[in-house]
Image (spheres, rainbow, N blue to C red):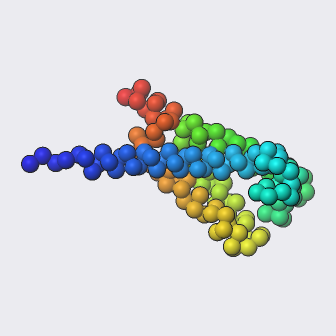
Amino acid sequence: MALSLEPVARRERVWSTATVLARLALAAGFLSAVADRFGWWGPPHTASVSWGDFAAYTAYTHRLAPYLPGGLVDAAAWAATAAELVLGLTLLAGFLVRWSAGAAAALLLVFALSMALFLSWEAPLSASVFAAAAAALLLGLSPVRTFAFSFDRLCERTSS
């Protein structure tokens, strides 16, 4: 009696779907946050807008990192924005997925811990930051063959 590969093939398809969804969800979260900082979702103090401009985001950064001197708060705000933009784009494209997922997990864990320590423990839980970090970690541990619709998988196929 031959062993059926159907359960394995089905599991691979589900795993591939999960990696695409994780990449898209993480990328959307990062890119949406960047868009909000530049007012693309609307002006400050309007519905569904967290910051609305970079000044409001910088003030929020200061709340999350009160230990930083004033000049470094601006640098930290710009560094976080650049990191989120790069990670959002690389995850969306499926480029360097493992590296991007690991960096995303680290960034999200720092963000979650800062929220917990300097705002409240409820803040990162309600914003699902720990869940996003866990999704990034799982994505980073996924086999490259499960990275459907990605440059990484395309490169793996061409090098095989």
The image quadrant that residue 93 belongs to is top right
Residue 74 visible in the current orientation: no
Residue 42: horizontal and vertical position, in percent?
82, 49
Q: Nearer the viewer, residue 94 or 67?
A: 94
Residue 151: horizontal and vertical position, in percent?
51, 32
Residue 44: horizontal and vertical position, in percent?
86, 54
Residue drawn at point x = 70 percent, y = 42 percent = 85
- Residue 26 drawn above or below residue 112: above
Q: Is residue 28 left or right of residue 64?
A: left
Residue 92: horizontal and vertical position, in percent?
59, 40
Where the C terminus falls, by quadrant? top left
Q: Residue furthest bottom?
A: 121
Q: Is residue 90 left or right of residue 73?
A: left
Q: Is residue 131 left or right of residue 153?
A: right
Q: Residue furthest left?
A: 1
Q: Nearer the viewer, residue 138 or 149?
A: 149
Residue drawn at point x = 32 percent, y = 48 percent = 10
Residue drawn at point x = 55 percent, y = 53 percent = 136
